[in-house]
Image (tube, rainbow, N blue to C red):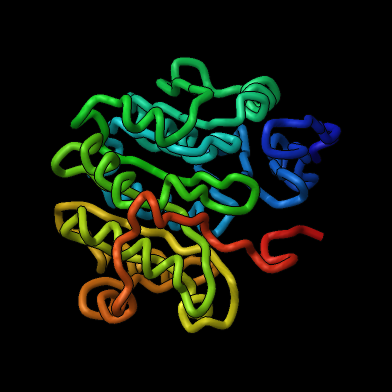
Amino acid sequence: MNEAIPVLRVTAHGTAKLMPDVDRERAWLLTVDGAPQSYVDLDEPTHLEFEYARRLGYALDAVAEAGVPLDVLHLGGGACTLPRYVAATRPGSRQHVVDADRELLELVTEHLPLPERAGIAVHAADARGWLEAAPADSADVLIADVFGGSRIPAHLTSLGYAREAERVLRGDGVYLANLADSAPFGFLRSQLATFAAVFEELALIAEPGVLRGRRFGNAVLIASHRPIDVGALARRTAADAFPARVEHGAALREFVGAARPVGDADAVPSPEPPGGAFGIG
């Protein structure tokens, strides 16, 4: 049983709290202003507690043959759950983690230290600014999981941002993003239209209930220039404890409908989640 005590710290984006999981020896939940942000098991970094994190993990597993090291850029740090996952599943990977909240990064690295020689470098910086300064063709995978509070900042939703992501990725690179929306999906549709204007292949992973408009929820976007192994991804997401669906091709184009790419001047943050959407008891 984990008998550690919670840790609180005021950071740039709110009050962060690390809470031990009483059922797992060295596992912790990170919340910011009461909203769950990350979950980390220091003894089992391949354990992905949150549904959206598992879906990102399934996509990461499909990027290359098992165990092949990757160069990964993470925009949004949280408790560095996915960087730890990549380090454990793909030893030798080189990873950069960028988060604007310096105090949060310090809290995480102090109390949930990263494994030694894991190849993970952490940077306190604005995600868009870092991306624009990053070398071209320098990443195999770019993972965007940036929330200012509970909303994705507007400057990370535009066509200019998508083009910068494409520039930093290698030719066969893959862009992954954690998005959130609910019916009528104005934000989600516009994000799909924006990335479809830059990348040749798109797929979306989400729970059927979210896609049917029954509730607010997460959706994982996958964008690349190479074909996505939708079949393998669909099998894994469908077999999850919380099954999800993979939309692509004509069905995804139909979902996007008449939505248009978003310019920097027109960009807005993702919608505010309804009360209690991501809260904990």
Residue 17 at x, y percent in the picture: 77, 38
Q: Position of residue 241 (x, y in %)?
A: 54, 67
Foreground pick, 269 / 221:
269
Residue drawn at 49 percent across, 73 percent down: 207
Residue 65 is left or right of residue 126, and the answer is left
Q: Quadrant of the C terminus?
A: bottom right
Residue drawn at x 40%, y 66% is 205
Q: What residue is at 40 percent from the left and 21 percent from the top?
A: 119
Count the marks: 0
245 sits to left or right of 242: left
Task: Tell me the quarter of the image containing the N terminus.
Answer: top right
Residue sitting farthest toward the front:
265
Residue in the image at 30% along x and 26% along y = 134
For residue 124, above or below residue 262: above
State left or right for residue 138 relative to residue 233.
left
Residue farthest toward the top in the current orientation of the protein: 117
In the rendered image, residue 94, in percent from the top left (x then y), is placed at 34, 25
76 above or below 37? above
Can you say whether 212 is above or below 218 in the image?
below
Foreground residue among 110 and 23: 110
Q: Position of residue 145 (x, y in %)?
A: 48, 46
Closer-to-camera residue (176/159) = 159
**Quarter where residue 169 is shown:** top left
